[in-house]
Image: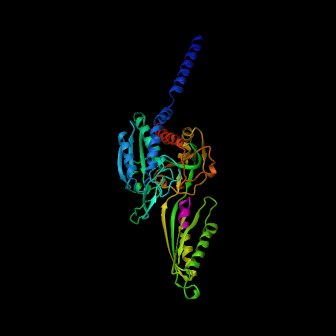
Amino acid sequence: MQNYALRISLIAALMASASIASAQTGTPAEAARTEIAQLTKQTESMLLAWRRDIHAHPELGNSETRTSKLVADHLRSLGIEVRTGVARTGVVGVLKGALPGPTVALRADMDALPVKETADLPFASKAKGKYLGKEVDLMHACGHDTHTAILMATAKILASMRERLPGTVVFYFQPAEEGPGDFIPDGKNIWGAKMMVQEGAMKSPKPDAVFGLHSWAGLPAGRIAYRAGPTLASSDDLRIKIIGKQTHAGSPWNGIDPITVSAETIVGLQTIISRRTNISSTPSVVSIGTINGGTRYNIIPEFVEMAGTIRSYDYDVRKKLHADVRQKIEKIAESGNAKAEVTILEKYDPTINDPALTEKMLPTLRWAANNDVVQTPLVGGAEDFSFFAKEVPGVFVFLGVTPPSQDMATAAPNHNPGFFVDEAALVTGVRTMASLATDYLHAGASR
């Protein structure tokens, strides 16, 4: 009995010792998180310097030459394999870890918007550029400067962990998320993420998963918002030309009035959503944003042109919407003896977060944001991250950037001249992107 008791005591002591050692060292994934936390603090000054430099020098889509050079030079300095000129001005970096494992991709967009900045910042943009043939003020009014800086810092941190990385990390620095600036894309309506995919950015190497984030006004700085499944809407341009017959407004019976037909069309389009679309599972929107026709108050014009947007969160619903919209416009025009030319340009697919991957990475998001994680409702905006997530499972999250002391309801939204970023959030962004990569790689390597 004494020998048995002694053996039990020795086993218990060994187990306790092993437990203490495990608590001290943790799993490889936990050790990586600890290292990421330390390295993020060390990189913070560079992170902010990159963000401010990019913010002060905004560039429109497909014109991000300065930004892409900054990115490419940085990645090369880290010993990362670099491809430039992808989708015209995009950059792809490939970091191969020393250990075998899966491949994960991280994405940031680089382009700015034709918006005049109103914030009084020492690094506020004073840049100008050409948009649709006109000189305009430029601003990073959607946070793409923060996305780029965050991924640059993430690349630096992961490169320093290369010897302990089980797998490969691919960095997509994407141009033209907002669309091309003054560049006409050969009439093919292709740019940004879609063009990167078509040019093979995701083939060599092909990732097993892709992650991205977006700075978001109206969320407290450092908070992460996520959603499994459909998250952002598809976005398709709707262009309509109603052709009638010009005549004097005092004798409309001598012509065909395209203005009246256009008014009926605008009202009729809303019945597609209210009467022909099943919105019990997912919402949809058809909106007309512009209407132009006529030159004089007493002349019924020959034609009227309208433009709008079609948005949905489901591929089948989207397809049916396109058919219903086209039919409705053409039949209303026919009923008024007019003709209709309808063009629908598919721009952005719906962004759909892979449900299983979202659930798997939720503990990572909670760690990165110190448990300040919430679910987001459906977002009516669109994002071409959707094209990456269509190729492989993806997760796209929102990073709050509004100072916590500010009223979230009155914060200037994205795309607004007053859009403001609390830079304290950028550290959370780096923790998020770096830990999503390492947690995914370690989970895949341990299978």
Q: Which residue does the image show at 64% across and 60% down from the upper left?
A: 280
Please state, as top left, top right, bottom left or bottom right, where the N terminus lies in the image: top right
Q: Is 49 situated left or right of 337 in this image?
A: left
Q: Which residue does the image show at 57% across and 12% down from the upper left?
A: 3
Classify 436 as above or below 380.
Answer: above
Q: Is residue 227 visible?
A: no
Magenta stretch: includes residue 316: yes
Q: How many numbered discs?
A: 0
Q: Is residue 38 visible?
A: yes
The picture places residue 397, in percent across and down from the top left corner, at 54, 48
The picture places residue 22, in percent across and down from the top left corner, at 52, 26
Q: Quadrant of residue 318?
A: bottom right
* Residue nearest the observer in this picture, 399 or 407: 407
* Residue nearest the observer in this picture, 306 or 432: 306
Q: Quadrant of residue 277?
A: bottom right
Q: Which residue does the image show at 45% across and 47% down from the upper left?
A: 148
Q: Is 71 situated left or right of 33 in this image?
A: left
Region in magenta: 310-321
Magenta stretch: includes residue 40: no
The picture places residue 234, in percent across and down from the top left corner, at 53, 59
Q: Which residue does the image show at 51% across and 47% down from the upper left?
A: 121
Q: Quadrant of residue 233?
A: bottom right
Q: Is 69 situated left or right of 4 in this image?
A: left
**Residue at the extreme top:** 2
